[in-house]
Image (tube, helix red, strand yellow):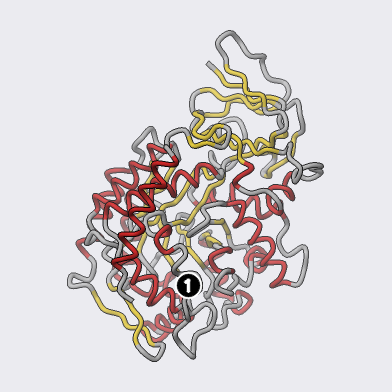
Amino acid sequence: MKTYIENGTVIAWQDGAHRVMERGVVVVIEGDSIVAVGVDVPPPGDGDTRIDASGRIVMPGFVNTHLHVTDTLYTKGYLEEASNLSSQARETNYGALYKTLPAVRHAIDPEAQVIAAECAFAELARTGSTTVVELGYDYEVGGDGDISITERVAQVAMATGLRCYSGPRYRAMHYGHAPGGKVWYEKYSDEGRRRFRDCVDYCIGWDSRYEGRLRTMLAPGQIDTCDPEMLRETRRVANAHKLPVQVHAGQSPNEYERIQSEYGMSTVEYMLDTGLLGPDCLIGHGQIMTRDGDMASLKPSEVAALRDSRTTVVHLPWVKARRGGVINSIRKYRQLGIRQSLGTDTYPFDMFNDMRMAATVCRIVEHSVDGASSADVFTMATAGGADALGRPDLGRLAAGCKADLVLVRADTFKAAPSYDPFKFLVLCATGDDVDRVIVAGRTIVENGRVLAVDMPAAVARLNEAARRVRSNIVD
C-alpha cells in the first residue's frame, strides 16, 4: 500500500539542491521510504491513501543537529538574562555558562528530566523537526551519571515518533564560577572513565533500535573538560563502531584560553591533535574558534584541518543572539569550505526560529543582504544536518530517501502571496504553521496536534516538576 501526497508545492531534491516544484507534483510513500517524486507517477491503486496538500508546502523534515531536552525547560525563564558576573566578561563569556546553568542542572532530579523530555520532543515534532540530536548530561544533571536516564529519554523520543540521535555526554572534569570572574576546573574521582564506559556501552547496544529510528552518538562534553586521552579513545570507538561524534567547542573565550594555556594549542589544533576531526564529527557552537571570535582569523592550517576533514560546525543562532553574541559568520565558514548545519540548542525548539536568526544575524555581521540566502539557510537546516550525520537519505525529498516530510500551511494571510517558498519558510514562517508531520511514513502530527502526547496532561506534569526543581536551586 502506498501514500500519495498531491496538489502541494513540493520542495524536491534534484541535481544536488532543493528545487521548488509547483502543483501537480506527487510524493509517493511506500513503507518508510519515498519511492517517487514528480508528475509522471503511476496513479493510486485500490487501498492506497491520498493526502490532499492543497495550500501546503511539502518540505523535508528538519534535521536538528544539537539540542538538550532534559534541562532546557527548567533553565527557561531563569537563565536568559543572568549577569556575566565578571568585569572581564564579553557577551559570550557567560556567567550563565559557568554559574547559573550548573546551579539549575544540579537541582534537576531524574524524573524531572523524563517529564521535560516528553514536552520537548513533542514541541520538536510539532514544529517540524523529524530528526533530532539529543545531547544528554552526566553528573551535572541529577542522577549521578546513571545511564538508565538516557535510556528512558530515548524511549520518550521513540514514543513521540521522532527519529533521534541519542548522545549521552561524558567528560573528565567539571567546572564552576569563582569570585572575580574566574572559572575553576575539578577532575572527577575516576576522571570520568566509568561514565565514559557506560556511554560507550549504551551507544553500541542501543544504536539502530526501533526500526532504525534511534541512532546513537558519542558526545564528549565541552572540549575544555576532556583530557587528550579521552578524546583519542572517543575517536578509536567511533572508528571501530561507526558512530558519529559531537563535542561542544568554540563556546566561550575562557574555553579557548584554557586550551591554549593547558596544551599550547588552539581549539582546532587540539581537536586535530587528538584525532577528533572527521566527516563524522560535529562541533556544537563553533562560535569562539579563534581568540577574537572572528572566523577570518583562523590560521590557514586550521582552515585546512576543518575543511579537509569535512567536519561540520553546528550553528546555534538564537541561543547566541539572545545573549548578545553571534557566530562571525555563516558566510565566512561557507567561503572557507567548512560544512555547516543548524540546531536549536535550547528553547524554543523551533527550527523556523533558528533559520530566521541565522539569516538575519549573518546579514548584520556581514552588513550585506546576501550574507546568508534563504535557500542556503534552509539547506543547512535539512540536507546540511543530514550530511553531518552521514545520512544522504534524510533532509531531502527524492526517491530512495526516508519518508520524513512536513506540510506547512501556505494558505494564510501571512503566507500569501508566496512567490518564493524558501523566503517564506526562513523569513516568515514559524512552527505554528506546521500542519502535518510524517516520519518514516507514519503521521505523527496532524492538524498541528502531536498524536502521541496528551498536551494538557504533559504540561501539567512539567509545571509541577518545574516547581520542585526551582525550589531546589542553590544560587
- Residue drawn 74% across the image and 36% down it: 411
Relative image position of residue 473 (x, y in whole percent): 31, 69
- Residue drawn 29% across the image and 45% down it: 152
Q: Nearer the viewer, residue 161 or 289?
A: 161
Q: Is residue 110 above or below residue 53?
A: below
Q: Is residue 296 left or right of residue 176?
A: right
Q: Is residue 156 above or below residue 142?
A: above
Relative image position of residue 463 (x, y in whole percent): 38, 53
Q: Is residue 244 left or right of residue 58?
A: left
Quadrant assignment, res 273: bottom left
Quadrant assignment, res 296: bottom right
Relative image position of residue 205 (x, y in whole percent): 27, 44
Relative image position of residue 450 (x, y in whole percent): 49, 37
Q: Is residue 152 left or right of residue 29?
A: left
For label 1, the residue is 251
Quadrant assignment, res 43: top right
For badge 1, the amino acid type reads Gln
Q: Residues within 10 Å of mark 1 (few under 14, many from 20)?
A: many
Quarter that holds the C terminus? bottom left
Q: Is residue 279 left or right of residue 410?
A: left
Furthest-top residue in this view: 46
Helix, strand or loop under label 1: loop
